[in-house]
Image (tube, coloured by chain):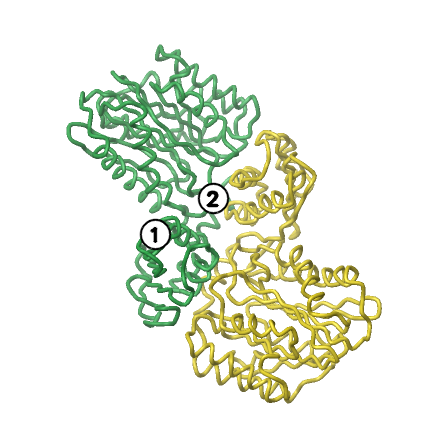
Chain colours: A green, B yellow
Amino acid sequence: MSVTAAAGFRAAGVAAGIKSEGRRDVALVVNDGPSAACAAVFTSNRCKANPILWSQEAIRGGSISAIVLNSGGANCYTGSFGFQTTHQTAEAVAAKLGIGAGDVLVCSTGLIGVGDQSFRDGVLRGVELTAESLSDTAEAGDEASLAIMTTDSKPKRSVREGEGYVVGAMAKGAGMLAPGLATMLVVITTDADLESAALDRALRAATRVTFDRVDSDGCMSTNDQVTLMASGASGVTPDEAAFTTVLTDVCADLARQLQQDAEGASHDVTITTIGAATEEDALDASRAVARSNLFKAAIFGNDPNWGRVLAAVGTTDAEFDPQALDVTINGVMVCRAGTPHESAELVDLTPRDTSVLIDLHAGVSEATILTNDLTHDYVHENSAYSS
Amino acid sequence: MSVTAAAGFRAAGVAAGIKSEGRRDVALVVNDGPSAACAAVFTSNRCKANPILWSQEAIRGGSISAIVLNSGGANCYTGSFGFQTTHQTAEAVAAKLGIGAGDVLVCSTGLIGVGDQSFRDGVLRGVELTAESLSDTAEAGDEASLAIMTTDSKPKRSVREGEGYVVGAMAKGAGMLAPGLATMLVVITTDADLESAALDRALRAATRVTFDRVDSDGCMSTNDQVTLMASGASGVTPDEAAFTTVLTDVCADLARQLQQDAEGASHDVTITTIGAATEEDALDASRAVARSNLFKAAIFGNDPNWGRVLAAVGTTDAEFDPQALDVTINGVMVCRAGTPHESAELVDLTPRDTSVLIDLHAGVSEATILTNDLTHDYVHENSAYSS
């Protein structure tokens, strides 16, 4: 159950030969309306893939009836041939569905530089196959979520019910998780009846505190896109704030699933900074720790090395007195007011869930970043990925 | 041959019991003058160790006659007891040499949070032992360079001759190499006769293009300090620009040694960005690539993954057209104008020396960052370090 949980949507996920071994690699999600409202957020990476360039233009029209996604190739830095492939993909979907190409979003994921004739053939074959097998069943939604996987070990899906409407979603992402609006491919569908402008506000509010706060390895993708489509099939127009809450819940659930499936990770690390002068300060401090390879390697080694936490916090411009900092790891306050406090030997780092709490003692704001440890498996997966 | 190469300096390096297995852990370098001119640059980390806090105050007087350094403990975040230890260390050196404590710089390196009574006893014992074995021989300089090693696999030394004067140096650093002025412990001595203000200008000019451009793992230390002491014993007052050139040469030599001994590295990666609108843009682009774990893991896997280069460049604010970028790895232009060019299979990544050249096509400025790959050994060393 994912993108077909909400009424008004059909989906499909097929194996079109882009990936080897008959794995599913093309997904199509169609909004049958009555509304074609849509919003999307895109990677803030300036080196954007062809599908991103296409989708950013297409969404300007304000209505979108279909989104087609492929794994097995990013179609990024593939030149004008690559952009033509994206264009042809949208045209092919449009022809099959009897809509305009400008009503079709395109997403790709995989290796940068992959986008040759064989890739194009695969994607277009996938369009044919998916268009012919579209269905509103739970299975169809599940198959679509399988077709967008890359190094994911499992599909990511989430469904929540609001008052008289449903929000369902699928996501892929297992590495290159870092902020910049989106950092993964996500398709969210709802049968609530909301205009595109309202969807856009809700989506930005939701991603700001969920996907933008997953920072697994500090790397930002060229292809990421989070798309929210509303069919209006429930006939219910929810209060925008209430809808935003449900949507945020879905996004938070998916963000957590992304963290838990991060490449090679052995710990899911929640880094919360409290006592900050501003939310921005709290984010900066949490993110600096999340990006410290030394800290992340220590957590892999079950070593509650709080010195590496402080060394990372010290690189930020956040407001704090260096001698007032507290650090608590898994409930043990190992550093209080800049001085060793409870024994680090009391910290149990054997559970996968790990929490680091930093108190800046400079205000009342706080923020949390979800990250992972740096492991041998991370190095292995990312040194062997493209071979 | 290191800090005793220049006339007017004595040094010693002893085993005082801070580190185990009888390894040397305390070094003392004394400037016998006639001049006591000195300059130093310090870590820009806001979480500074006690010796940094001490040395930053001491150097304000403008004259320094001795520097004492220990490995085996950072004396950082060790509370007021730790600061008293640093103060007592300077006092002990001063008493032995018949100078003021304010003429003594102190450096520590090792684990944050280590600075208890046993550490204090060890450092003070080291002061006694080094003061009694000071010598101006090459061996004494070599022993001092051994006493500051932590995870270094070898000592780092460099000596250059100017016109009528000598510059000699020792350094330690094998991880946590990132910019912020200094990023390691370095002591440089010269028998040239230059005032502290001139030394300061020369040192900042030299470190800006050498130590500040080593970025092995993006992590910044709490304890780093680069110190330059001038005895004036040669009687030669060199032209400041000529002296800066010699000094920069020494710093570049040491920076390269630091890169080559980075923890667990299997490739020394030189990342040069050319065609930038400003030097700052070139630095930002090179540094973004140097900090991409995905890129660094790919290099470890001998995978010339230029997509990860572009994805990192895309996160910067540097001026460029994303479709105009060229990437050349070890002489093979794998991406030209944002399109796959020469086959990545032509790139030979088996040599340890690796070069990445990025052309932004936006100007004439350029800058280079020295970094390393991300390896299993890096993860291993840094997950097991404090146990």
| Residue B109 coordinates in the image, percent (x, y) | 53, 71
Does residue B129 appear to the left or right of A364 in the view shown? right
Question: Is the residue under label 2 in contact with that under label 1 (CB below 8 Å)?
Answer: no
Tell me which corner region of the image, top left, top right, bottom left or bottom right, holds residue A102: top left
Q: Circle 2 marks a residue in which chain?
A: A
Q: Which residue in the protein does label 2 denote?
A: A219
Q: Is residue B170 left or right of residue A96?
A: right
Residue at the image position 53 percent from the left and 49 percent from the top:
B291
Assign a secondary structure to mark 2. loop
Mark 1 falls on what kind of element? strand
Which of B103 and B180 lies nearest the eye of the viewer? B103
Q: Which residue is mark 1?
A: A268
The quarter of the picture where residue A171 lies is top left
Percent x, y for residue A49?
49, 30
Q: Residue at x 68, y 58 (%)?
A: B205
- Circle 2 packing at 10 Å, graded few (<14), some (14-19), many (20+), is many
